Amino acid sequence: MRVINTLTYKDRLRAYAKNPLSAMLFALVSLAALLTFAVLLFLISYILLRGLPHLTPSLFEWEYTTANVSMMPAIINTVIMVATALMLAGPLGICSAIFLVEYAGNGNKLIKVVRITTETLSGIPSIVFGLFGMLFFVLALGWGFSMLAGAFTLSIMILPLIMRTTEEALISVPVSYREGSFALGAGKLRTIFRIVLPAAVPGILAGVILGIGRVVGETAALMFTAGTIAQVAPGVMDSGRTLSVHMYVLANEGLHVNQASATGVVLLVIVLIINALSGLVARKLGKG
């Protein structure tokens, strides 16, 4: 394996060509990679071509009206929703993963129950979460259609994702890091927060990024919990629509399809910016 890794790309092709099975597998994985890239490129190009011509200054006015169908209130509500959902699910998911990896012993029945629970939650459709949020947060607790009800519903949705990715990131940290820290006299808590967590930051951020992507792109659950009012939510107990809900409402009405396409461009740009910033933070923390 070390010899193959030191070869150039052309030398690898010659080596693969000598074995028909290796050549076939190489062709298959190369084709899969190209198809994945082509699908991503097509989606981005399609969204940009459909939406960029319809981006106008009126779409970014502070107040929403039926004339300008501004997306600015939805952008602000999206930021509020993402921040609130991450504040609820982030610490809980990361701390749960730390307990499962660092404190719960191997073969613990509690670990099996928690993992089965998280896998079950991660497979539930978003519409089911929306119905639960409406019945419990909106009606049973009396919160009404509010940003807080939507944030709690979304936090339950992304909690399994953050837990599992954090757990895998912690497991990937070599045991020698922990043993070296213990040998130098550090305690369990100091080892976790000073050695293990910094080494696992890129994996943890990957889970957070995926969670942000799900929050930003969620529509069904928020329509049942946060509502669809096109204004900046004055508080967490008030209703407001996010960008994805805003785009769905515009497209569903059939009167502002072009503006919905423009909203999709802004939504795509926001996701790309979040991914770029998260990657930059991961690299900075990794160097530190």
Image: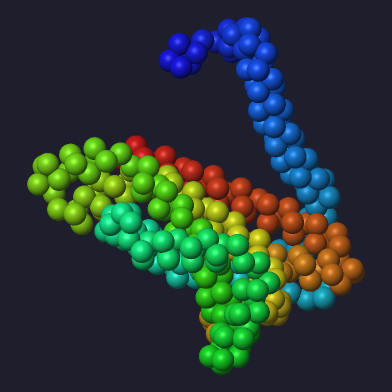
User: In this rendering, would 19 be left or right of 196?
Assistant: right
Residue 176: image location, x then y, percent: 24, 37
Residue 55: image location, x then y, percent: 78, 55
Residue 190, compared with residue 143, is above or below; it is above
Camera sees residue 185: yes
Task: Give the residue drawn at x 52%, y 61%.
Answer: 119
In which quadrant is the C terminus drawn?
A: top left
Residue toward you, 275 or 9: 9
Camera sees residue 68: no
Residue toward you, 175 or 204: 175
Task: Give the residue drawn at x 82%, y 62%.
Answer: 259
Task: Give the residue drawn at x 51%, y 10%.
Answer: 7
Specify the quadrant of the image occupied by residue 163. Answer: bottom left
Residue 140, compared with residue 268, is above or below; it is below
Residue 26: image location, x then y, percent: 65, 21
Residue 238: image location, x then y, percent: 59, 84
User: In this rendering, would 104 be left or right of 243?
Assistant: left
